[in-house]
Image (cartoon, rainbow, N blue to C red):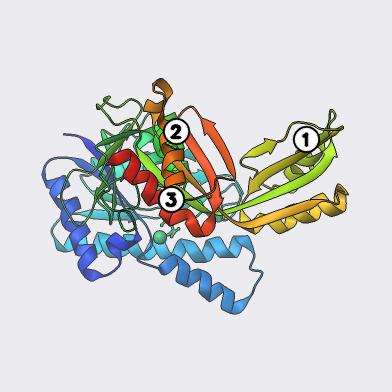
Amino acid sequence: MALIVQKFGGSSVKDRDRIFNVARIVANTHNAGNDVVVVVSAQGDTTDDLIAKAAEITHNPSAREMDMLLAAGEEISIALLAMALNELGCHATSLTGWQAGFRTDRAYTKARITKLETERISSELERNRVVVVAGFQGLNKLDDITTLGRGGSDTSAVAIAAALHADRCQIFTDVEGVYTADPRKVRNTRKLDEITFDEMLELASLGAQVLNNRSVELAKKYNVELEVLSSLNPVPGTVVKEVVKDVEGMLIKGVAKDTDVAVITILNVPDEPGTSFKIFGLLAQKNINVDIILQSTGRDGKKDISFTCAESEAETALRVLRESAKFDQVICDETCAKVSIVGAGMQSHSGVASKMFEALSNSNINIKMISTSEIKISCIIDREDADKAVSAIHDMLFE
Ligand code: ASP
Ligand code: MG
């Protein structure tokens, strides 16, 4: 007998049929002799709908009230799923995040889990009940409901698996696993059998959208192996873990893009100590998240510095640089994208970068910036070229 945590996303519980589909998966797992804790998200687009409802009332809702509102979505799902399980003769108890013992910090709408008190979940399991827990929510020190940020149910599931030392943590979704690129947009993509936490983290932050970033961080920290699989099609999914088998030829695990990128360049800044500190210190004060930084070699005591940030933050960045830092030559290229290849195998192999550049060159796509890490190579390009670039790179590396 094993303890299994199963998480189902919003699309997997979006209506009556899907709820019963999930209930059958859970009941089968329980009937096979396992203890099961289920984590569910709000049904379908419920969270977006609730956000829209708030916007009908005010453009500036209090974060506390937003959390009160959004937590309701998951509470509907847990009750309905527990009812469906009971219908199938599988005894289930639904628990809100706070009933399940999730304690968080005070940061409404993006709270972090500080503690998970597992007594209630454990006592329900001892009574041989399936426990259905509301994802995405917890309680802070003020006894107020908090939520964990969009996509936070994955993190709830991983936290439960870590705290209970579960044997397995299965993340069910509407795709069959993690692919080498978005299968809806790129031809000949492959489903990966396995991927490391680090590779998954890179792909998650690049918008691969199968797993929430924080959940992967947490899984890595507590070494919780994750299995990403489809709730609609019972085929093996993708396992995310610390070390994976070195499959021949699988140097690269995926090609991803991030289309929310702006490049800001400050021309003719003094080529002297303290210049970068002045620029990035000011940006940090405004909480602007800077990604790639590039600096030209000095000439006549001057140099140029470029960096990327999210398009939504570009305006604030420009204002800070022009008004507070008094730089007069600041330009912004707002419509950029970042395409990246990710794979732990590239650490020990050469020639991967040149293949990527060759693919872009063949497609006549200009590279504006390049950045590399041990397991990732990223290029900044024009946003309108992003899809074409991903396909070209994928063809080059996976054909
Ligand atoms: N319902 C929340 C959201 O849509 C949490 C989740 O789905 O994981 O972001
Ligand atoms: Mg959702």
Q: Earlier in the sequence, mark 3 or mark 1?
A: 1
Question: In x, y percent, where is residue 391?
Answer: 37, 51
Q: Residue under circle 2?
A: 354
Q: How dense is the environment of label 2, judged by Cα within 10 Å: few (below 14), some, or many (20 and up)?
A: few
On the picture, is 372 further left or further right than 310? left
Q: Which residue is mark 1?
A: 276
Q: Around disc 1, counting alpha carbons within 10 Å, would you say few (fewer than 14), some (14 to 19), or many (20 or more)?
A: some
Q: Position of residue 329 (x, y in %)?
A: 82, 51
Q: Is residue 74 above or below residue 124?
A: below
Q: Quadrant of ligand 1?
A: bottom left
Kind of element beneath mark 2: helix
Question: What residue appears at the point 37 percent right and 58 percent down from the top-left corner?
Answer: 41
Task: Residue 71 in the image: state x and y as whole percent.
Answer: 47, 61
Q: Is mark 3 within 8 Å of ligand 2?
A: no
Q: Which numbered disc flags the more N-terminal residue, 1 or 2?
A: 1
Task: Using the image, determine if residue 260 lies above or below residue 219.
Answer: below
Which is more toward the observer, 74 or 359? 359
Which numbered mark, 3 or 1, is in the foreground of this view?
3
Query: Of the residues shown, which amino acid type is indicated by label 2?
Result: Ser
Residue 170 is marked as none
Residue 210 appears in the figure: no
Total number of numbered discs in the rendering: 3
Question: According to the image, label 3 marks what residue?
Answer: 363
Quarter of the image with the C terminus in it: top left
Disc 1, SS: helix
Q: What is the spatial separation of the Cα atoms under label 3 and label 2, in whole angstroms?
A: 14 Å
Residue at the limit of the structure toward the bottom, as seen here:
56
